[in-house]
Image (tube, grey):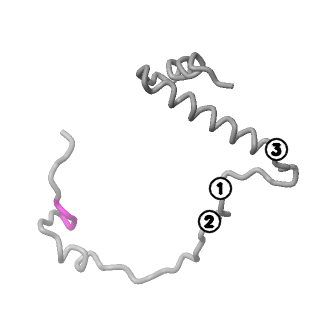
Amino acid sequence: MISEDDVKKVAALSRIHLTEEEIPQFTKNLESILTYIEKLNELDVADVEPTSHVVPLENVHREDVVKPLLSQKEALSIAVEKQDGGFKVPKVIE
């Protein structure tokens, strides 16, 4: 059984400010949560492998395919400003 003192202690450790009116409700909520956890502890999970994700994850790999690139002239054709064969951009570090 969870007491109001237990809730106050957990709140203090969690740095959560509870008003006196909130403490009875949080006591009831915490008691309900712990009761549910006790039910979960009754389950037989001996044959269940631990998981970090609910669904299996795998990396998506694809082959590297060489594709034609833009020439320097084509790439610079959309540049607002050009300088020495490259894009001219505002200075960001002084």
**Quadrant occupied by the N terminus:** top right
* Crowd tier of the residue under label 1, counting other residues whose Cα lies within 10 Å: few below 14, some 14–19, many 20 or above: few
* Crowd tier of the residue under label 2, counting other residues whose Cα lies within 10 Å: few below 14, some 14–19, many 20 or above: few
Q: Which mark is residue 59?
A: 2
Residue 20 sits in quarter: top left
Number of numbered markers? 3
Task: Give the residue type that dot 3 points to.
Answer: Glu
- Which comes before the other along the chain, label 3 or label 2? 3
Answer left or right for 6 relative to 76: right
Residue 48 among those drawn in magenta: no
* Secondary element at image label 2: loop
State if disc 2 and disc 1 touch (CB < 8 Å). no
Of circles 1 and 2, which is in front? 1
* Crowd tier of the residue under label 3, counting other residues whose Cα lies within 10 Å: few below 14, some 14–19, many 20 or above: few
Residue at position x 22%, y 65% in the image: 86
Coordinates of residue 29 in the picture (x, y in percent): 56, 35
- Which comes before the other along the chain, label 1 or label 3? 3
> Magenta part mainly helix, strand or loop?
loop
Determine which residue is flagged by label 1.
53
Q: Which mark is residue 36?
A: none
Task: Give the residue type that dot 1 points to.
Answer: His
Answer left or right for 23 relative to 51: left
Of circles 3 and 2, which is in front? 3
Determine which residue is flagged by label 3.
42
Task: Give the residue type that dot 2 points to.
Answer: Asn
The boundaries of the magenta stretch are 84-88
Question: Can you say whether 81 is above or below 17 in the image?
Answer: below
Coordinates of residue 46 in the picture (x, y in percent): 87, 49
